[in-house]
Amino acid sequence: MSYEELLRLALRAIRAHKLRSFLTLLGIIIGVTTIVAVVGIITGLNAYVQEKIIVLAPDMYIVTRFGIIRSREEFLQAVKRPQLTWEEFQRINGGILSHAALTATRSVKTLPVSYGTHRLADTFVIGSTANFTSVLNLETGGNGRFFTETEDEASGFVAVIGADIKEELFPNQDPIGRSILVRGLPFRVIGHMPKEGKGLGISRDQWVLIPFQVFRKTFFAPNDPLDYFIKARGGVEGLDASIDETRAFLRALRHTPWRSPDPFGFLTQDQLQELWRQISTATFVLLTLIASVSLGVGGIVIMNIMLVSVAERTQEIGVRMALGARKRDIRRQFLLEAALLSMAGGLIGVLMGTAAALLVKAVTGFPAQITVGIVLMGVSLSTVVGLLAGFLPARRAANLPVIDALRAE
């Protein structure tokens, strides 16, 4: 029997019980919808994180109080560490680190910012050295400029604002040259950044960037957090040597016993990427397991319905075998029916999963990407489930004795 004839018979059997066929597919549809939506969102998130969140260059690293925290115990240990200080940064920035090509620092506070009648209660105000913008490759996009080293040393009251700040405070006017109030103190806007999104945990569209010296004198408290940004000399190849040198210098500066752990932490691009991979992989595995339960239930439902179909069509099977149909023809027909049922559920699930991912993206702005690979995965997975579910019914149909099948009512 040709595959074309088998396909025609399988489709006719499915069409004969349309409602039952659709209800049979619900488990497959729900499972595939969930998997496609989850994979699409995680794929989009991975691309977004690589492009927007992990903004460190491969030869850059950050010295922080906490570093990478993976457990409650690590957090409790890190809380006991003293804050990094401005005096320590001055020592680092004095050229004592031979493996450091660039050193910058920043501190962040949430402060009220206003202009005229417009007021923002909690705004990220960042005090940084002038070279901080070079560390993160920040640009104003032709909208003014960043402050200079001279302005930083002179504690100039100047500021660069993010895109959201510009839209909130200056919706229909150019902010450059105008003064905003940061906790009541006037800062002249010298530039504003284009829309960029988040970076290192803070939305760069909601920044107000001011020189570190004026920040230190007006807003900075002794226990406020301070981070050091260091560019390794010699590129990526010099990264490990630079980290080791900085670690040794800071431990010596803090008189840390050689057996004690570092009283500070490091962040590198590789560490951030590895941390995100662990988080996204764990999320994907958990949600996939949940979706797999639905797929498994869908497969069991298909198997039971196909067993019922074999019982209903016993006489038809007997007649076909009496007319010359071979066991493998019967087996292929029922396998093909199960596969077609499951594939149809997979296609519906792919469409619904794609719609769900794109709806989440449209409503929440959460990144999502549906690729050809994700579509093929959804359809292939559902087809495999159908083949596995149809194996037992197909085998039972093929092994029916011809005489008993012909006598069946």
Image: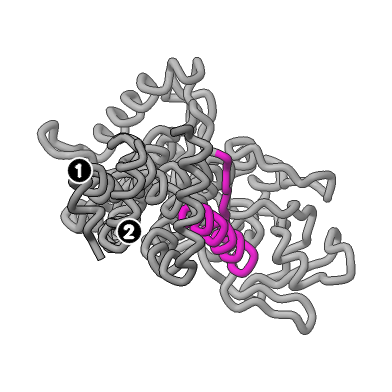
At which x and y percent is residue 402?
22, 46
Residue in the image at 41% along x and 50% along y: 337
Mark 2 or mark 1, which has the lower sequence index?
Answer: 2
Q: Is residue 350 magenta?
A: yes
Amino acid type indicated by mark 1 = Asn
Q: Nearer the viewer, residue 40 or 30?
A: 30
Element carrying mark 1 = loop
Magenta-colored segment: predominant secondary structure: helix
Q: Which residue is mark 2?
A: 313
Is 5 within the magenta? no
Q: Percent x, y for residue 365?
A: 61, 62
- Of residues 348 and 229, which is closer to you in this image? 348
Q: Is residue 101 left or right of residue 317?
A: right
Q: Which residue lies at the image location 45% right of the left edge and 67% below the top edge?
A: 17
The amino acid pointed to by label 2 is Arg
Which quadrant is the N terminus positioned in? top left
What residue is pinned by disc 1? 399
- Left or right for 401, reference 368: left
